[in-house]
Amino acid sequence: MTASHCPYCALQCAQTLTAHAPDGVAVTARVFPTNRGGMCQKGWTSGSVLTATDRLRTPLVRGTDGELHAATWDDALDLVASRIAALQAESGPDTIAVFGGGGLTNEKAYALGKFARTVLRTRFIDYNGRFCMASAAAGANRTLGVDRGLPFPLADLGGAQAVLLLGSNLAETMPPAVQHLAGVRARGGLVVVDPRRSATASLTADGAGLHVQPVPGTDLALLLGLAHVVLADGLADTDYLAARTTGLEELRRSAATWWPERTELVTGVDVPTLRRLAHLLAAASPSRGGSGAYVLTGRGVEQSSQGTATVTAAINLSLLLGLPGRVGSGYGAITGQGNGQGGREHGQKSDQLPGYRSIEDDAARAHVARVWGVDPMTIPRSGVPAVELLRRLGTDGGPRALLVHGSNVVVSAPAARGVRDRLAALDLLVVCDFLPSETALLADVVLPVTQWAEEEGTMTSLEGRVLRRRRAIAPPPGVRSELEVVADLARRLGSTVAFPTEPAVVFDELARASAGGRADYSGLSHARLDVEDDLFWPVPAASDGAASHPGTPRLFLDAFPWPDGRARLVPVQHVGPTEDVHPGAPTYLVTGRVLAHYQSGAQTRRVAELVASAPEPLLEIHPLLADLLDVEPGDLVRLTTPRGTAVARAHLTTDVRPDTVFLPFHWSGAGSANRLTTDATDPISGMPEFKVCAVEVARWEGSVDVLDDESLLDELGVGATAAGVGAVG
Amino acid sequence: MRIVVVGHGMVGHRVLDELANHRPAGVTDDVVVLGAEQAEPYNRVLLSEVVAGRYAPAAIRLPSLGAGAGRMLTGRRAVALDREARVVLDDAGDAHPYDALVLATGAAARVPDVSGLADLPLLPDAGVHVLRDLDDAVGILGQVHEARRACVVGGGVLGVEIALALAGHGVATTIVHGGDHVMDRQLGSGAGTATTGVLERAGVRVRAGSRPTAVGHTGGRVTSLTLADGSQVLTDLVVLAAGTQPDVELARAAGLPVSRGVVVGADLASPGDPRVFAAGDCAQPPQGSTGLVAQGWEQARRLAVVLERRRAALESGTGLDAVADAADDAPLPAGGADVVRVKGAGIDVVSMGVSGGAHRPEGSRRVALEDPDGGRHLEVVVLDRRVIGATCVGGGRVASDLVAAYTRGTLVPADPAQLLLRPVAGAAVEAETPLRMPDGATLCRCNSVTKGQVVAAWRDGARSVPDVAACTRATTGCGGCTDAVGGVVEWLRESDPETARDGATSSASR
């Protein structure tokens, strides 16, 4: 029996894995402070992915016949190395790009970043965490001074009198987390802001709280309106603001332009609800004698062209109420992917070095270069964020090769049809995966790698708690760890930089590289984590002879990590979504998740029980809109945006606003939501606006076969152009 | 480029902000804004709320502009415009040369022609006020605690808001309004009646169809108003809210086309001078002025775009006659620029687009819900599947939904009457009994377990919630369904004691 954690989301539910023949594991839930012995259907069935019938067990190389064929590791790696060398000789180091994933262990994320910077010496590395956490990170960094998703243990929510959940559907995305809301629901203080009555929004029913349903894309205006009411009605924590923040006067002036009636005009949230909400939050905050309040954001408000501003406004609100840095109150972002937190700390991000250091900071470069044994001058500078990176692939002067690790970009990236075109324009696409994902199937070389139960490593959960992932079974023959892949490639490319392949050794190096950084892991090791499962970063190394650092469950209790110790109130303004409804597309499209599937569905669509629960994408549409469009329950509906067309089955429900439809994004093919989404991005974080665009909705009168074969959609001439993704000038 | 903005109110302020936002990197302009008031720019929309005591004057200041936005001169009134020399003169004697001039002088309160009014200066201690700037608001606020009775002359939106604010201070307040009912620009008679009812319940008397003809005063203080029908209303505070008068003097004196406001095209340029622009309450664009700040802000944005597009011509002075661009002539997006919501405690009145007595386009459809005794009046005007106008008194969230539909142009239901009612929020759904629940109903969402699967587990021998959990994983996610699963187990136990004992197949669940 092996104690480990779930392969999926950032809650990282504790699991017990028991090996059983031939190469599977039995999975049971384990009691842990986050999941409290609970696990959702994805977690319970996670063992199935190990034995998926199409599990990759051998490298594949695309032959002259255009098909993928089995190859030996030596042949495949030789090919990749020689192509990389040849392309770099022709076009320079930046011609190779790397795309990582928020599901990779800290060790792999670290090794990948190091490989990109020291072996490939390319500045073009980024990862799919750019699709999830970049705006939360940017917002927290510029206000609180550091980005740790939840700067407090999840269990702290239990005592709260109010929790404001903005754009999070955790009842479906991380169901066991709902247990931590039991207290606040009993106190009537759960407030869910979501244009849709999601499973999470339904938790507010029966007196448990309040569901606020703004027009899609207007969460920022709602937050500005709340700040206005808090200030106007004298609800702010003035002592806290004076002692612990700077920037109040400008924030006050900025909020003055968001009076309640204007806020209602923009958000569709009526004035009494706005006032009630502000007063509910204030009554729960410590300065007014409440037992505590939390403001939490999720992808619903962050995946926006103004996501950084929205997170900033959420933090401003929490600061006005005096929440961050107080036990039992605070602001947090609910990280999505399994290692979405650690993945953004250790060097996969285009502008970062391990330990959450800036790649533009010369002291940071010098420190990391010492650990890596390279000249700081050889470390490239910042690259570009994921969407921009994908846009440049195969364009004039753009990267000619891409290495993909733990990401399925042709399903998960916005305006995904354009991404497919960009991948096709590459000279070389290499995909490391354990399943033949839609992206892997497009690759020139596919390298089969280990899964969670087959490997050692660490993951950093949504709380900033560093967890051990442990090996329960040996990987199938023919499968290697990405740590080995990276080391093998480095050697073949003639690098003398050391790439250890033992995860504990890699971790020790990561810890040294992170020393002194914002996410300092230098006091951690696999051995320590094996006996302590309650260590939250930063955990700096203790000086000789001193007791080891106990970790930091709660940040900001004494100060914010700015030179003056004060949090920054940063005024922001609402502009609105890049694509608002208009006469040709008078309905909002909101995308999101369902419980049974994870991300692009590459894993969960291979688990029979999950497919039985959610076999296909269902379009949620309000009966009034369906009536108008002559759509009956179960009818196929065509959705069109300038990026493309999708076809999905209608599910009539009053859970969505009549002006909005909702489509989950876990599927490829004709029902793939990201055929429709816009690749407009936040100017600060580079995060795409997945959550809102304008869509034309109509009954689909065409062939039903398109559901199985999306190429039919394009042949039928309804695919539209890939306007969102084009060559970069 | 040298840009002079005359007027530092909400629109002038926004012009500076938008100019800064649209200016290309590396370009600097010499921007000067002349503000007649001493105060820093503030949110004029909230003046009635200052009177209501809901906001402190300092709480409504507008954001500071970045260092590059321009030089702000407060307490400077522009007194002359020399278009030949392209220079604005201020009351301190300074000259401000420009390549582009933006008039954002706003509007002044219209003072009605009432006998005796001229005898009283518009000063706080005379008891007669207008509400146009922050000093006015502070002045009124300074009197409410001594005043016992107040009269508001004019029952438009501002008059209604002021009356509610005064009544909120406990002052017996009367609105004297010339029209048939309050807010007759926005509201039809049904909505007007409903609104009057709301006002009266809030302690505001409404004298509609009536005008003041004389002001009585004693010792330099107002004491009464005489109305056209000869009746007299005692009062010790009068607030004039009888409309506004665009401040056009600078333009008129400079020979620019002026009608009610400074005439401008869709590009906000004066037809008389391509270097002079106007925005906000002082301007008269082709579609007319709404007097609402949303329109002025939208104009500020367009102005910045237009100035940027014409930068080369304005700087060089050549080709200025030919700069007009089709894009500049497109009407500004409505974007809610004419949505009116009355601010004040206890009132819920919203109007937008085609409303009240406004002309209704051919083919449009009006649907109304009249509920005079309930203080409610809802109506919506629909054309081509879009909301083109609506009026809501006491509409609650119906109004906010209508605003969203109107401002976005989203599709309206086949039956527009659906727009006027909302499903009852929070109506308790009767808990389904295990007996009635269909087999396919999901009990445990986290693990997709249906009632049928729980029943099947029972048949396989599961006799408790932990047994069922071991079999089906129900309750093992968030645990929220534990009671429901327990209920089904209990029901099975009671309805089927035989099965409970020996595990024989039950028929109860069929």
Image (cartoon, grey):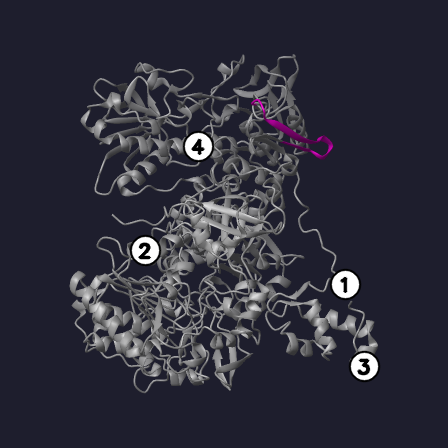
Q: Is mark 2 on a helix, strand or loop?
A: helix
Tell me the chain of label 3: B
Within-10-Å neighbours for mark 2: few <14, some 14–19, many 20+: many
Q: Is mark 1 on a helix, strand or loop?
A: loop
Q: What element carries label 3?
A: helix
Tell me the chain of label 1: B
Tell which of A29 and B207 is nearer to you: A29
Tell which of B276 and A627 is nearer to you: A627
Q: Tell me the residue that label 2 is attached to.
A: A422
Q: Are marks 2 and 3 in contact (CB under 8 Å)?
A: no
Tell me the chain of label 2: A
| Residue at far front of view | A65
Label 3 – label 1 distance at C-alpha: 23 Å
Q: Which residue is drawn at 43% across and 65% down?
A: A149
Query: Is B372 left or right of A152, judged from the image as shown?
Result: right
Q: Can residue A167 be seen in this view?
A: no
Let me know if marks 2 and 3 both belong to one chain: no
User: Mark on residue B433?
Assistant: 1
Let me know if marks 4 and 3 both belong to one chain: yes
**Residue B374 is a magenta residue:** yes
User: Mark on residue B501?
Assistant: 3
Within-10-Å neighbours for mark 1: few <14, some 14–19, many 20+: few
Q: Do the residues labelled 4 and 3 touch (CB within 8 Å)?
A: no
Which range of residues does the magenta coloring cover?
B361-379
Label 1 – label 4 distance at C-alpha: 53 Å
Label 1 – label 2 distance at C-alpha: 55 Å
Query: Is A252 left or right of B403, judged from the image as shown?
Result: left
Q: Is residue B283 visible?
A: yes
Mark 1 or mark 4: which comes first in sequence? 4
Q: Tell me the residue that label 4 is attached to.
A: B333
Label 4 – label 2 distance at C-alpha: 36 Å
